[in-house]
Amino acid sequence: MRIDAYADPGTPDRRGGWRYLAWLVRRQWPRCLAGAVLASVWMVLLAATPYLMARAVDHGLEPGDLGALAGWTGAMVAVGGVNAWLGMMRHRTMTKVRMDANFRTVKVVVAHATRLGAALRAQVGTGEVVTIGVGDVQTISGSLTAVGPGVGAVVAYATVGGLMLSVSTRLALVVLLGVPLLAVALGPLMGRLQGRETEYRERQSVLTARIGDLAGGLRVLNGLGGKGLVADAFRRDSGRLREQGYRVGAVTSWIQALGMGLPMLFLALVTWMGARLAAQGHISVGELVSVYGYVVALGWPVAFLIEMAHQLSRGVVAARRVVAFLRLEPAPDEGTREAPAEPSALHDPASGVRVLPGRLTALATSRPSDATDILDRLGRYTPSDATWGDIPLADIPLPQIRSRILVAEAEADLFAGTLSSVVGDQETNLRGAGSVDLRLRRVGATSHNAAADAAQPLAADELAPLTQALHAAAAEDIVRALPDALETPIEAQARNLSGGQRQRIRLARALLTDPEVLLTAEPTSALDAHTEATVADRLKRARKGRTTVLAATSPLLLDRADVVHHLVDGKVAATGTHRELLDTEPGYRALVARDAEAEAAAGQAAEEGEPAR
């Protein structure tokens, strides 16, 4: 059975950590059964070697029968060869078991994260998801050694106990009662380890989330002079995590120490009892040799049983975290009415904003959060009384809304990959990608004025959908500047691009989907005035006849809008065109003038040598 990383992982058992581990075993039971059988035979044959050795001594060496000695010796060599092959197959099989559990857990976690969608961030922190993906998945897969060596250890232990019965009932009882006594001694430590491990994982997820926040906002913190304060807080939190790790390590070290020491005491007792029995003449020399061999052979099963208990203790903690994540549910979708068949107006009663179909509508407010809240309500990311046509958005099935209304966040995530895949690597979008690349390079190579070329519209029949989106977002210069154009690798969150470049890439990605309704906030806030004007013109042309809502205070964008809603305290204070509001609304005029002064200052800084964005 091969491992298919793209197959359906199945429906996980979310009733608890132990049940989740059992589900992983059931999903690949033939492979787990094979691992258990191979491990059992391998360990039993380890115990068979002392048995064969005892026969060689008693029936060959002691009576001087060279033929019997050679026969039993040959049997030991054959058993050793077979066992070497079994050990290799056992290890290979258990590696597949662990990898299957790893891939399966990753797939169910990623699939559930996708299912949660926008509700993910509201229910669980980024650090929790990262900790599950980085640490818990590995711990869970490692705990499945219990189905191979663990089962084999139990079988081998019982087999050795049975073989010891042929030597001495007293020795057999000591062997059979030894492991239960070890379990009683180590049980409390295993329980303590689970508690310490759980607390450690919780602290780890919090710190992981903080690392992600720091990585994303380090430049801002440095500019505000807060880097030192945050570094001190992080140092304190990481110190607490380290101390918790020491406590986990202390319990683990006791388990490992007792796991090594107690079996040795137990096996030493068996050896001493066997020697006494031989000295008293109750067992033969060969049987004494077999007792020594059984003691050595018992070392493997006992060690595996203790390791199995340790791994299962850690694995169930990790599985509980995965199960807790899988139990999260998105907001219920109770929509039963069909969305409007034709483009229709969107209305948000809470603010009074009405978005007419086919228009470019702008929301201007001094509080960006007010505009963002309106976009979230119109995109049904938060509960509201918003309507689409005459139908409440809450009554429309969510898939219909998502397929026609797109809310493009200003800080939407950008995943690592080539530039074409970051924007949207769909087969239809990349049709003619070779000509796209040549067209972009040709513009860059023949022009003496890249900015002028960027402002010139290209013929529509020369543009594939991907390039149309890049052109509308005025992002051709990004492609030209990269060494491999569209195939240049882009880091996660596009960290190897500037803020303005990232903003244009996000806009291009949104435009590439060509939604019926596009809702976006501050799509040009990180651009210089010249580039922003280019984007405003091209965006209006690209979205002609489509419904578009922009939350912005830039006069360059507002001047291109068909309708502008001036918001005060989250409600519509005035509606009109940009120029009409400038003439009639002092508050709007003050808001736009403030933004225009900021743009002028940014343009002057660029002329004085500051880098363009």
Image (cartoon, grey):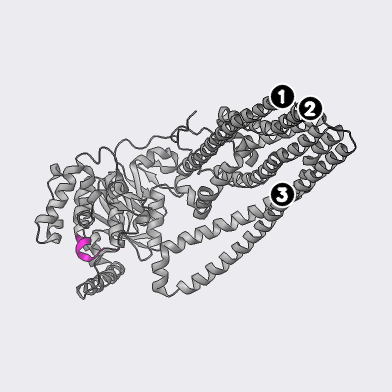
**Is residue 517 toward the left or the right of residue 207 in the image?**
left
- Residue occupied by mark 2: 63
Label 1 vs 3, first from the N-terminus:
1
How many numbered dots are placed on residues in this image? 3
Residue 279 on the magenta segment:
no
Sequence-earlier tag: 1 or 2:
2
Residue type at mark 2 is Pro
Q: Which residue is mark 3?
A: 260
Disc 3 to disc 2: CB gap under 8 Å: no
Which of the marked residues, 3 or 2, is nearer the chain's N terminus? 2
Q: Position of residue 408 (x, y in %)?
A: 34, 51
How far apart, in angstroms, are the residues tagged by discs 1 and 2? 10 Å
* Residue situated in front as seen by the camera: 418 or 299: 299
Q: Which segment is the magenta one?
A: 524-533
Residue under the image location 62 percent in, 28 percent down: 78
Residue situated furthest right in the rendering: 280
Work out how far the residue at label 1 is from the one at label 3, CA to CA, in angstroms: 38 Å
Question: Which quadrant of the figure contains the C terminus?
Answer: bottom left
Residue at the image point whose x is 53% and y is 43% from the top: 329
Residue closest to the eye, 158 or 108? 158
Write down the residue under mark 1.
68
Three-letter amino acid code of the residue under disc 3: Met
